[in-house]
Image (tube, rainbow, N blue to C red):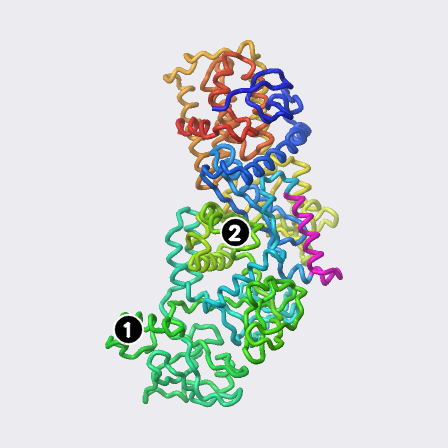
Amino acid sequence: MRTPAFCRECLQFRHLLFNSRQSRRCLLSLGDKHWPQSELTQKTRLSIESAWSDRLAALDAAVVARQNSNDSSDNKEKFYILCMFPYPSGRLHMGHLRVYTLGDVVTRYQRFIVGRQVLHPMGWDAFGLPAENAARDRGLPAEAWTRDNIDAMRQQLKDMRLAFDWSREFATCDPEYYRWTQWLFIKLHKSGLCYRRKAYVNWDPVDQTVLADEQVDADGRSWRSGALVEQRPLTQWFVRVSAYYESLLAGLNTVRSDQWREVAKMQRGWLGKLDGTWVQFVLLGLDGKHILLPVLAVNPVTMATVSVVYRPSLTFPLEEAAECRAVAPEFDVGAAASPADNIVDRLGISRPSPTLTSAGLFRADVGGGLAGLPADSDEAFDAALIELRRLGAGGHRCSALRRDWLVSRQRRWGTPIPVLHCGQCGPVTVPEEDLPVRLDAEPIAPCPKCGQLAERDRETLDTFVDSSWYYLRFLDARNDKKLCGADKAQKMMPVDLYIGGMEHAVRHLYYARFISHFLHRIGVTPQPEPFDQFLPVGLVLGRTCQLADGRYVPPDEVDFDKSIHLPTGRAVTVTQDKMSKSKLNGVEPGDVLRRLSIDTTRLCLLASTAPQSDRVWDEAGILSGVVNWQKRLWRLVTDLHAVGAEQQRLDPTVDNPDNADVARLVSDRRKTVAAALRAYESTYAFSVAIARMQSLTSLLLSASPEQRRASPLWLESMCLLVYLLSPMAPMFSSELWLGLSAQLGSSADTKKLFDGKFRFDRGVVEQLPDEALAFARLNN
């Protein structure tokens, strides 16, 4: 147990905030002497923040530095918490602030109350088309535009006093990062999981690039430019995710949190039922870029020829909408087939010198009577899959809903694809020792196989590839020999809690899980699943005010009681929508923080709404409840000071268990602790915990003067309340604790209680915070 030391400023023996030769200061010597105060005003709230803000930032930096440099942290239980890193589009919005507040609250609980070794890093998902377009519109290089945005957003995050480990920061546009993204592509290619073929793609004619299916709206328009999307046949790079469908489905059975289970349902729906396979057939009957009917395909298992028949009712993607059947006299190929050109287009084989294509096979006769098994039996199908995998011709169970991951993008600002196209050797991956292939690399280079001049691949990788493995790089961000050291991955993986927007619960998680399963297979990670828990966070919605002519007006120009635009007197339609500049419904986080204070804003984001639900930012409605609670907490400590330290004498007989008020306080305190611990450790329903803490606050305020003066139960409950509040509002709770320590720490009768059970000088990293947590659990 840590013993008190002499504080040079208050000249008393206390648990020190800083304990070094240079400075020995206790918690009581800090702050701006707000105690005693009669009322908590806005000015006081901002004054509290001013007094504690820099100290909190210094404390967080010191804890991280000690953790990163001290091997003694190896014996601590780890907790890896990761918030989805942002796209540096210019400025953070309230949605970012909501996600990062949740992450910070859990970080402070795990670090300072539970006492775990917490990793809470931050970086930047920096590549992408929006930055490229925005920079072009401003006549700037994409990198300059992105770096300026990163600088601005980093400062915003630091101003919010979020406890990130900035020593591990990186951006996906750093060559030191995308070198390993390219390495990952090469490993996929060497494993037979990367291939190149012609495919129909969603083409944005304005932005001149391929779009993912999710980037096309219900009207067939681009999510960004608004242009009608075209279907174009292009030769593209694909990653054979279908080889891991079974593994990805099985991995969903290992998730343990309620939030993850809901997302797992979405992932299962995304993958669909695995009741078929993809098979590569050699096509016969090719004549130049023309195809003769009927087209014959060679069954890779039996080497028999089968007819290829296009049938529009199939649910496969367009370029693979073909059915392979054994040739049968009663099957009228000519009647079922489309015109020749249509078949060529649909199959995606009208390209130079193709020999292979993928064709969908749903319970088709792949192997005939393979190994003497009935052709239509499950046993024959399973045996055929094994044989197809052995031949490298497919054979992985898959669904009609999904196709392989198209990773090529026709843009400049992205990870260059590390491939050289040689006239003699074809596509050849760049040697690993030559990575990274930089954005400004020469377009012509020697072929690694034959030495002839070859052309670099001109396209870049989908940004989902960049973000599919970043959680690993945070563990070993400065390693220039490996993507991530095995010892670091063994110690810190999986991510204990992953927090991000609900809109990323399917596609991003799907690709990140696939890459993690692949890296596990090649020995980089100790387990296939990268995330133990995932907390999906709803949107922050703003009041959207629109006139009859479609024009948007700012909310401060609207009388909401009458739904009238004040400057013009015209009727206004009010809805709740995702915040955006075009709809004039956005709220600048910096303005909110400066006006309300950081901790008050944090409590507003946490209160009254579950994190998974969308949050309507109605500042007036949210703020009144939070500020009233802060005022009542402030009054608790102020009223305690009114008792006077000399009158503070504990009398255990006051806490008679037969007294109804005492029994009610015991019960309410247990419910509050239970709700708080459930929120901090599993449900993250901080709105429920806050509601219970508000109830306990009201009960403590109703206590008699005798209870405040002499009841150990009342004093312990008040200390516990502030203790449980601290991860949510660290600066405000620090000031409340300062007020408690000034009163209880100066009375010999209460000092033992205060120091013994609630030693929460958060700067003392070496303290045993689990002692206080154990006390809380005893009362659960």
Q: Position of residue 468 (x, y in %)?
A: 52, 57
Q: Residue drawn at (49%, 76%), measured in percent from left and top?
A: 319
Q: Which residues are magenta?
A: 134-157
Q: Quadrant of residue 271?
A: bottom left
Q: Residue drawn at (38%, 18%), measured in percent from left and top?
A: 657
Labelled disc at residue 556? none
Residue 274 shows in the view: yes
Pointer 1 residue? 380
Q: Nearer the viewer, residue 217 or 742?
A: 742
Secondary structure predominantly adopted by residues drawn in magenta:
helix
Q: Position of residue 442 (x, y in %)?
A: 67, 69
Numbered marks: total: 2
Residue type of the residue flagged with mark 1: Ala
The residue tagged with tag 1: helix, strand or loop? Answer: helix
Residue type of the residue flagged with mark 2: Tyr
In the drawing, does residue 327 fall left or right of residue 208? left
Q: Residue drawn at (75%, 61%), measured in percent from left and top?
A: 139
The residue tagged with tag 2: helix, strand or loop? Answer: helix
Q: Give the vertical position of 329 relative to 208 (above or below).
A: below
Q: Quadrant of residue 547?
A: bottom right
